[in-house]
Structure formats: structure tokens, C-alpha cells
Amino acid sequence: MNEWLTADNILATIFAVFGLAASAVTIWYRPRAQNRKRIGYRVQMDTPFGNSNDGGDEGALTTVRIGAFGNFLEGLDDATVVLIRIENNGAETIAESDYTSRDALHGLTVVFSDRTVRGVAVTQPEVNDEYLLEHFVPAGPAGLHSSGRKIFLPPVPLNRNQHFKLLVLLTGGPVNSGVRITGGLQGGDVVRNKGVSIDEELPLFSRQAKWITAALSLSVSVLAVTIAWPQAVVPPRGCETGKLTVVGSTAFNQAAKALKAAYEKDCPGSEIDLRMTGTTDGLEALVSAGEQAEGRSPAVIAFSDGLRTDADRYQELEENYVAISTFALVANSSAGLPEQGLTREQVRQIFTGKLTDWSQAGGGPGTIKLVTREGDSGTQEIFERKILMGAQTVADNSVDCETLKAADKNDPIIHCKQDSTDEMLNAVADTEGALGYSELNSFEKFPDKKTMGVLSLDGQEPPSTNDIATSTYLFTEVEYAYTYGKPSTGSLTRSFLNFVTLESGQSIIEQAGHAPCERAEMREEMQERCQQEKDEQLAARG
């Protein structure tokens, strides 16, 4: 559900609903007043007779008249002319029988409040509506006639939107005196219309316009639903499905977790099982799986801190360098750590029991306690090879890192071992005076590091991932991804290995705090450094 709630899907849904609503309103909209029979009227002109406003295109007087205007004009200084528009603006046709006047001879009555009718004429209707004139004759009670302040109109049938106009000559009152039309309709109204501009009039759509609007709205809605509807995820090119087991270095655990999450998200149907319990454990699990696979490459990848080709049973393994990891000396800060850090010689003297107090190494007074990894740890192998350089260290002689075992009570310094990087960091954090080592990024992300500090080595701080390619800092090592033989093309093992060693996975590895060997902007420098690390390790093994 949360994956569906994206900004694009929400907007698509909103516009789909809005489009359907707009279409519905357009198709079914009809002004409320038009849902029944209705005659509307309005005064379009009310002016003194002789005014320059002649009504524009309102039409000429017909032969249907009450008297002749000219007969009434002499001496009538207060004469006014009014033009009235009467129209059917309802939803239904109005027949003669729809009018409800009591005398049954006329339909509507025009009433002037303060003026007397002197003459009235029907203006020329539209060409197609000329037949309407027949309803205004003959004169008399059955046709168009006036009396005093009133004009009596016959029951004129009107189709929808059909109209006629009255031009009336009046005396006895000023312009804009009251004008109203009375009368009734069966199931309808006679009302005064409000004069509005074209921009103010509510739109009325033709049937064709309504169907076009509906089709467009439906198209937009289908498009929006298509965008918002959960789609079947198509894996990117190179993805494979199935199950893969990834084992090995605890120092590379955070990077492995990030790689697993990214690959499984991009490649549905893939399942990656992480078992990061240590380099040696991982390599042994890989070899065991390879031996059981009977000549095939098993679905197992092992991450290793450093090159592992020393044992005969590893001869079938194929290494792929992935990144360079930086390691660091870490110590409990309770005793006051030496500001200048430690030299490799001082580290060797500490681990061989020649220096046992921090004050002897430039720090404050406090007993040094050693915390290291088990012998099958890749990190431990790197530490022994690069920092201790073969020096014989004090043996493991403590369970809790605080007290010596009874059999080792004469040892000069306490030394305890831990199974994983996190366990080592916990032991250093909890033990006053403790000294250990860790992959740098694991230390940086360790939740409880307030009581610990990183020590420089031979005057050098651990380099950032950006500086590793040119740094001379010693405590670094290549991280390798091992497979048993060469995985077949199209296998999940090959696909994940490509992901790890090529650009997409390399970016994730860098975010996890390791310097990728295939780093795009420094590819040549990083590959040279990775190869250099490999050559140095091979040379050290003879």
C-alpha cells in the first residue's frame, strides 16, 4: 500500500475523479429554472420618445398595431417608448392550453405602474417564427389589445428558446417606471429575467459537445487509472530469480545488507540469504557447497577480508576484488589515550606484553587490556600480517576481558577474543583500558561509541573512501567476493556477482563506507591500488 501512495499516483487519482465529476456536471447540468415550463421577460429599452437609441437591431414595426403612433404624439411631451422581450427559456414547449388566465381569451398581461399605453406593436420575429404574428390578430379581446395601463396578450404558443418583442408607446410617467407581466402557466412560472452579459451566462452544451466532453473525460480517467494501477514489476536487464546464500566477513556485513536490499527490490523473485559470521566460516561454507554441487558452481558467494588462496581446499575458489576496507585501532578512552596515537612498534610491544600501561605509550595511567578476534577472522589475519608482522602475542587468557584465567595469572597483560566485529566493539566500549581494532565504517556506525576513540597509526589518521587510492595508511585490505568455480551465465550467482562488482553495486558499497575498486571517477587509481594490495599479500605468503 505504501508503495502505491506516491505523488504521481495520488495526483493521477485526483485528476481522474475530477475529470469524471466535470464530465457528469457537463452532461447532466441544466439550470434549475429550466427543469420546468417557464416564460421570462425583461425590459430591453425604456427611453423618451425621439431618443437617439432606436433599439439597434430590434426590428421594424409590423402592421399589427393599436392606433398609429403618430396620432398620439402631438402635445405629448412625456411620451416614452419601451421595448419588452418575452421568451420561453424553460425546458418544455408552451402550448396555448398551458396558459391559466381566468378569461381564457388572453395569456399574459403587461402592467405599467405609472404610464398609460398609447400604442403597441410586435417587432418582426425571426424568419422561421413569422407564423407567431397570426396569434396577435384579430384585434379585440381575442387578440393583442390594450386598456389604460395594461396590454393583454393572446395565449401564444412558444417552442424552447422562442421569443417575441413588444414596442410600446406610453405617456403619463417617467422612463424606468415599473413594468411587470402577470399570468400563469400550468406547471410553470412567469418571471422577470435578469439581464446578464455573455460572460456571465451559464454555458449550455449541445448534445454533441456533451458526448465529446464525456469521451475526453473518460480517456483522461483511463490514462490516470493506468498510471495509478499497480503494475507488474518488470525486472531490469540482468536480473535473475531464485535463492542465493551470501556468507563471510562480519566487517562487510553492513555493505552486504545494503546490497541484498537493493538487489531484491530491483529484481523481484530473487531471495538472498545473509549469513555473515566471519571470513573463514564463509569460505568453508562455500567450499562445502561446491563439493556437494558435483562440478557445478553452487548458489553461494563468500565475502573475505583479504586474499585466501593459502589452503589447498581453496584452490577451486575464484576471487573477485570488490572494494578496499579501512581498519583502525580503537580503544576505551577511560584512561586517557595518547594524542599522537600509536606506532606499529608500540602496538607490537603492547600485544607481546612489553607495554602494559597506557602511560608507557603516551597516555594517562591505566592498565591496557587487549581485545582481538578469533583466529579464523579475516580482520584478525589482516591485523597480524600488517600490524604485528608475525610478532608472537600474549595468548588468549581471559573470558570477560577483565580478569585473568587462573592458569594464566602470571601473564603480563589481559587478552580476550571475540567472535564478531560487533562483539569486539562492545567489549572495547565496556572495558576500561581496552585496545582492539575494527573495520572503520563498523566503528562509525556503532551505536554505543561514546567511551571509545580511534587511534592514528604511525602518525596517520584512517583515510576516507575518497583518499584511499593515494593514501599510505597501512591498515587497509581488499575485500573479495569468492565463488566456487565460475558461475554459469544466467544464474543468480553470476547476476549478483556482476551487480556487486559493477557500477550499481559499487555505488552502494561506497555508501556503506568502503572504497569500491571500480569507482567510476577513479577507476584506474582504485584498480591499481586493489591490485597492489593483492600483490603485497601474495608476496608476503611467498
Image (cartoon, rainbow, N blue to C red):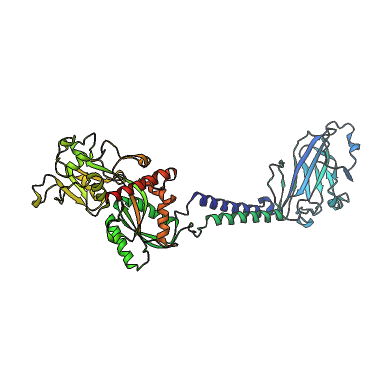
Residue 427 coordinates in the image, percent (x, y): 21, 47
- Using residue 38 as the reference point, say whether residue 333 is left or right of it: left
Q: Quadrant of residue 329?
A: top left
Residue 262 seen in render: no
- Using residue 501 as the reference point, say whether residue 383 is left or right of it: left
**Depth check, front residue: 102 or 97:** 97
Q: Quick check: 264 above or below 516?
A: below
Residue found at the far front of this picture: 542
Residue 451 coordinates in the image, percent (x, y): 23, 41
Q: Residue at x 10, y 50 (%)?
A: 408
Residue found at the far bottom of this picture: 294
Residue 118 coordinates in the image, percent (x, y): 85, 39
Residue 347 coordinates in the image, percent (x, y): 20, 41
Query: Total number of numbered labels?
Result: 0
**Depth check, front residue: 250 or 164:** 250
Q: Quadrant of residue 246?
A: bottom left
Q: Residue at x 38, y 49 (%)?
A: 509
Quarter of the figure that contains the N terminus:
bottom left
**Depth check, front residue: 223 or 240:** 240
Q: Residue at x 29, y 52 (%)?
A: 250
Q: Quadrant of residue 295?
A: bottom left
- Using residue 117 as the reference point, say whether residue 474 is left or right of it: left
Residue 391 seen in render: yes
